[in-house]
Image (cartoon, grey):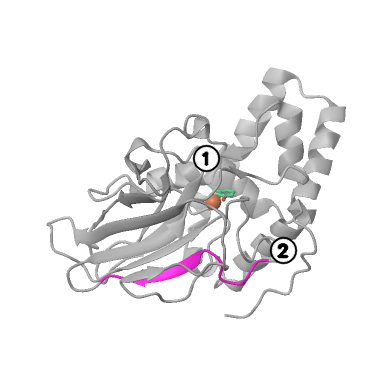
């Protein structure tokens, strides 16, 4: 893929936001998939969202000063490139819930703003791209991909995650392009083994518009440490998920509301300090 032309001299909300917005625009037009939406549906959705806003204004007697602050803040969400961040943190979890509530296979969760397709291929057993001396606890992950009927699937696991400082390559400065991003292809037995490091808990940028809302509301900005995956196989529904680590305090109060008990790993700690974990995926056949 093409390198995103975004200045990133320092890890700032505007820089990671601009990268996430640029990344979103490199995907095919999001409008194409909804080109056939009837006006009645557009009207219903827009009306109901606006009614919810009107009700809130009436119930809380929202003032002109508050209305002007809202305008300024909404403008700054765009200026900081933080619409992907805002939507994925505070809205996507319900979209995902509705989109996947028919599934019998693995639970999934939100994608978030930092996925990049076509990460380097590492085969069925391999190490994710990382720097020499990459900080963080080594983690070896064994798993399989099967269909809901137990058939092994020669599927793919795309894995991406933050480093030990909580930074994602291509969205924070001074990281190799594909750091901690890799694609693993299971063999006919459905088995894969991935070597990586444990990521750190992740604080969403505090110096942009989303951070301003969090501070003004007295919330916190943390997500628990997590591994992002997309798991795919021919004839099966794409699974987008995140995996979490036990004991992370933010498993209880994730700012993005994306933790599910089925997605919490049970790693084993070895005498040398490294860790290993087993976690497998069951994919739902596509229905047509
Ligand atoms: C992340 O790393 C993330 O996974 C989500 C959902 C939002 C912001 C940053
Ligand atoms: Fe993330």
Figure quadrant of residue 140: bottom left
Give percent across and percent down for residue 158.
Answer: 41, 65
Please name whichever residue, 241 or 81, is drawn nearer the observer in this view of the structure: 241
Q: Is residue 242 above or below residue 38?
A: above
Which residue is identified by label 1? 224
Identify the mark nearer the N-term, 1 or 2: 2
Quarter occupied by residue 98: top left
Considering only vertical position in the picture, is 186 above or below 12? Answer: below
Which residue corresponds to the image point at 26% horizontal and 54% vertical from the top-left? 280
Closest to the observer, 136 or 128: 136
Residue numbers of the magenta segment: 175-186
In the rendered image, which residue does mark 2 sit on?
173
Quadrant for the N terminus, please: bottom right
Report the Cα–Cα distance between label 1 and label 2.
22 Å
Q: Residue furthest front?
A: 271
Residue 82 falls inside the magenta stretch = no
Comparing 27 with 194, the one in front is 194
Give the left or right position of residue 228, taking residue 146 as reference. right
**181 is within the stretch colored magenta:** yes
């Amino acid at each position: 893929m093409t390198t995103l032309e975004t200045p990133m001299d320092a890890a700032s909300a505007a820089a990671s936001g601009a990268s996430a917005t640029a990344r979103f625009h490199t995907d095919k037009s999001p409008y194409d998939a909804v080109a056939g939406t009837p006006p009645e549906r557009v009207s219903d959705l827009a009306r109901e969202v606006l009614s919810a806003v009107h009700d809130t204004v009436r119930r809380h007697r929202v003032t002109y000063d508050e209305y002007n602050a809202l305008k300024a803040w909404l403008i700054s969400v765009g200026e900081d490139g933080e619409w992907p961040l805002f939507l994925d943190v505070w809205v996507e979890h319900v979209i995902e819930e509705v989109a996947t509530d028919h599934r019998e296979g693995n639970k999934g969760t939100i994608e978030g703003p930092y996925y990049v397709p076509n990460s380097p291929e590492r085969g069925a057993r391999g190490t994710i791209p990382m720097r020499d001396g990459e900080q963080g606890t080594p983690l070896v992950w064994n798993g399989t991909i099967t269909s809901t009927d137990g058939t092994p699937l020669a599927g793919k696991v795309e894995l991406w995650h933050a480093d030990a400082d909580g930074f994602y390559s291509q969205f924070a400065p001074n990281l190799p392009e594909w750091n901690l991003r890799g694609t693993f292809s299971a063999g006919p037995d459905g088995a894969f083994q991935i070597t990586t490091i444990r990521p750190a808990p992740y604080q969403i940028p505090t110096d942009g518009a989303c951070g301003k809302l969090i501070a003004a509301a007295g919330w916190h900005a943390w997500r628990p440490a997590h591994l992002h995956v997309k798991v795919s196989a021919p004839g099966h529904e794409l699974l987008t998920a995140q995996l979490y680590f036990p004991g992370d305090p933010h498993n209880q109060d994730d700012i993005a509301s994306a933790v599910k008990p089925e997605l919490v790993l049970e790693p084993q700690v070895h005498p040398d300090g490294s860790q290993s974990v087993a976690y497998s995926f069951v994919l739902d056949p596509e229905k047509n």
